Amino acid sequence: MEEGKKLLCARCNVEMVPMPTGFSYLGHVFRTDVPRCPSCGQVFISEELAAGRMAEVETTLEDK
């Protein structure tokens, strides 16, 4: 996401803010800060995060 640009929640029209968020995959839980709506909790996962870090974690866990 570009610096200075704000993400708005499509449900609430409230600015999303980085918050610690838990994810689980194959029984493993990990936490990372992602943009999240402070009102309804909707999370935004960027393409960069999904194709990068999350894909790496999935591959690592599947190889175990």
Image (cartoon, rainbow, N blue to C red):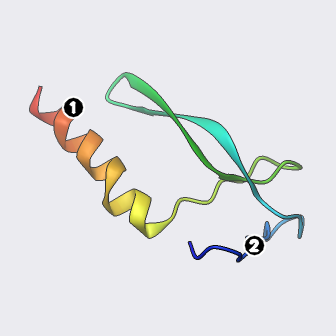
Q: Judging from the image, what secondary structure is the residue with disc 2 in?
A: loop
State the count of labels. Answer: 2
Please rate how many residues cluster around mark 1, counting C-alpha atoms within 10 Å: few if below 14, some from 14 to 19, many from 20.
few
Please tell me the numbered disc located at residue 6. 2
Residue sitting at 84 percent across and 64 percent down? 15
Q: Which residue type carries mark 1?
A: Leu
Q: Which residue type carries mark 2?
A: Lys
Q: Judging from the image, what secondary structure is the residue with disc 1 in?
A: helix
Name the residue carrying label 1: 61
Q: Position of residue 63 (x, y in %)?
A: 10, 33
Q: Is residue 19 left or right of residue 60?
A: right
Label 1 to label 2: alpha-carbon separation: 33 Å
Query: Viewer-proximal residue, 60 or 4?
Result: 4
Query: Viewer-proximal residue, 6 or 9?
Result: 6
Residue sitting at 84 percent across and 49 percent down? 40
Q: Is residue 29 left or right of residue 19?
A: left
Mark 1 vs mark 2, foreground winner is 2
The answer to which of marks 1 and 2 sits earlier in the sequence is 2
Identify whether 63 is placed above or below 28. Answer: below
Give yes or no for contact between labels 1 and 2 (Cβ–Cβ under 8 Å): no
Q: Position of residue 53 (x, y in %)?
A: 34, 50
Residue sitting at 64 percent across and 36 percent down? 20
Q: Position of residue 24 (x, y in %)?
A: 44, 31
Q: Position of residue 30 (x, y in %)?
A: 45, 29
